[in-house]
Image: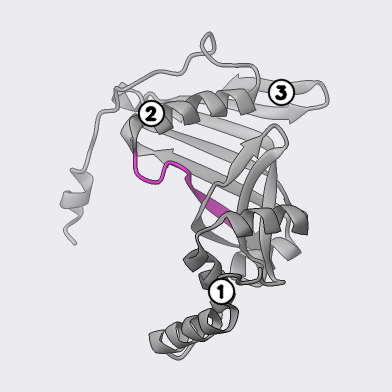
Amino acid sequence: MDENKLNNLRKNYQKGELLESQINPNPFRQFEIWFEEVLKSNIYEPNAMILATSVGNKPSARVVLLKGFDESGFKFYTNYNSRKGRELSLNQNAALLFYWMDLERQVRIEGNVKKLSREESLEYFNSRPIESRYGALASNQSDIIPNREYLEKKFSELKEKYGDNPPMPDNWGGYKLIPDTFEFWQGRPGRLHDRIVYQKSENGWKIFRLSP
């Protein structure tokens, strides 16, 4: 591709500002404030987030969906035998990235990941649409399969076997990322973006600004 086409893809951000005088001293509350604004904006998949993991100095990233958050952390669900699950079993340090383009905002969150209890995972699993539950049961996530037909056949066989009550797989469940660092980014004109960081310390949250 002609590099000039990429170099000319420019946007002057001008939809907001993020000043120390405006932020909440609690990063979870600041996230909640922004997330409520995201929900009101009606953007597509507002809870989509990039989850980054790393093992042996080899990082990997993928999009997952946020399924709950409070001051104890941020929840998501997956197959424990997937690549991300295997990597999290070896290295519990991970990062999340929310990018809300329509509001010219992003939030980076770093921390340590723990498994949720089986009871909490089961409660969420049973709240999902039945097709999604069968999808989790049919898929050995990240495994190589011969073709699409193989997956669809397995899906159909499981539906015939379990009817309206598919069981939660033993290797499926939730995680919670417990943050130690937040970075809130707001696009600004001239690339002089606002970057406010919250870093956990023994005395609470230390707040500082980064140069863009």
Q: Which residue is mark 3?
A: 205
Q: Closer to the camera, 78 or 155?
A: 155
Seen at 69% across and 61% down, the residue is 88
Q: CA distance from mark 3 to mark 1?
A: 37 Å
Q: Residue furthest front?
A: 164
Q: Position of residue 202 (x, y in %)?
A: 83, 26
**Residue 115, can we see it?**
no
Q: Which residue is mark 2?
A: 40
Q: Quadrant of residue 111?
A: top right
Q: Which of the marked residues, 3 or 2, is nearer the chain's N terminus? A: 2
- Dot 1 surroundings within 10 Å: few (below 14), some, or many (20 or more)? some
Q: Quadrant of residue 117?
A: bottom right
Q: Are marks 3 and 1 in contact (CB under 8 Å)?
A: no
Could you tell me the amino acid type at mark 3?
A: Trp
Q: Closer to the camera, 210 or 155?
A: 155
Q: Closer to the camera, 10 or 203?
A: 203
In the rendered image, the vertical position of residue 80 relative to residue 210, given as above or below: below
Could you tell me the amino acid type at mark 1?
A: Gln
Q: Closer to the camera, 118 or 110?
A: 118
Using residue 99 as the reference point, say whether residue 160 is left or right of it: right
Q: Position of residue 133 (x, y in %)?
A: 55, 66
